[in-house]
Image (cartoon, rainbow, N blue to C red):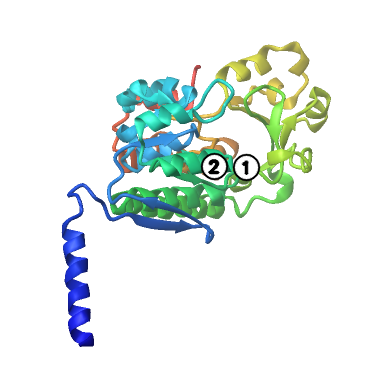
Amino acid sequence: MFRIRHLATCIACAVALLSQPASAEIMREVVYYGDRSVSLPPEIDRIATNWEAQNSILTMLGYGDRIVATTRIARSMPLMQKFVPSIKAAALTTLGDGTVNVEELMVLKPDILFSSRALPDAVSRQLRGAGIAVASFRSNSIDALVERVLITGEMLGPDALEVARRYQGYFDDNRRRVAERLEGIPPDRRVRVYLASGAPLSTSGRPSLNQDWMDLGGAINIAESWFGDMPYASGIASLENIIAGNPDVIISMNAEDAEEIRTNPQWRNVKAVREGRVYANPRGLFWWCRETSEGALQFLWLASTLYPDALADIDMREETRRFYRKFYRIELTDNEIAEFLKPTY
């Protein structure tokens, strides 16, 4: 009798499954950081993000053309527009005050929203209730960046995960290559650096993503201990402290800030300005010094800039060409590579 009832139950279950609409999908769950998870369809077709740098990662993983909502900054980046033309038609994920545009996302119905921070619980519930997965990530360190690439790849699917794993191997190899070439340079011969991150007096200390790539590139960050009690170890420096720190080299995230530092008389007594060693940070689809997968080139470029003799065998033009060919499937021209390495805007 039990076997008959069991057979009847199995038949009923099978009938129920067959009666489901053809469009019903078997969702997959991705668990990350041990205590977070997202429920996703088998195929990710529509993507939203409120994190500028995430657009570059998505493009590297082969999903740039599936971005349906992004930020104003990402949408306006000239090279993002060139290599991902569809980004120009993407809606804005956030409102003017920086909050997520829930109404727009409900209309667009992306499969997933990649967020730079945890959203308010009410917003997350509303989006998830509409079938939009929400993934937020750790940030502000090199390790968190590489981990985010891998997690994003897993969420997007096997094809993206394969690229993410190759990227991790490439990143680790660049770490090794730089470390091997710098290991003979003692601390007292390391180059002292000041980073202008978004404005001439805006900078970062430890712990931060910026500190991490300066460590990897062999730099001594003169602001390392300035903002230990500030969020993200970042803040506004005083010009007096910068002058007292007297950096050998200044790296500016923006070309216009680099020009301001070079030409402003208040900076003229800083060693880096006197000796003509003020550099605009490279920028591709996004700034290499930020939370982008292009950061795999950032510390390689920095080490090559600070210690050209130790890295004489590293040609940053060819490194740039190979990286974008291998991971972004982009063939850069010589002029484009020159603009990446020495941006003029």
Image point (26%, 51%), residue name: 25
Question: Of marks 1 and 2, which one's residue comes earlier in the chain?
Answer: 1
Amino acid marked by disc 1: Met
Q: Position of residue 95 (x, y in %)?
A: 52, 23
Residue furthest out toward the bottom:
1
Does residue 294 sit above or below 159 in this rendering? Answer: above
Amino acid marked by disc 2: Phe
Residue furthest out toward the front:
1
Viewer-proximal residue, 331 or 70? 70
The answer, for residue 323, to whether it is visible in the render is no
Q: CA distance from mark 1 to mark 2?
A: 7 Å
Residue 284 is left or right of residue 329, and the answer is right
From the image, tell me which residue sits under label 2: 299
Q: Position of residue 166 (x, y in %)?
A: 36, 53
Residue 111 numbered mark, or none = none
Image point (69%, 31%), residue name: 203
Q: Position of residue 272 (x, y in %)?
A: 69, 26
From the image, tell me which residue sits under label 1: 214
Q: Are dots 1 and 2 in contact, CB under 8 Å?
A: yes
| Count of all numbered marks drawn on residues in the image | 2
Q: Residues within 10 Å of mark 2 (few under 14, many from 20)?
A: many
Secondary structure beneath dot 2 equals: helix
Does residue 140 sit above or below 16 in this rendering? Answer: above
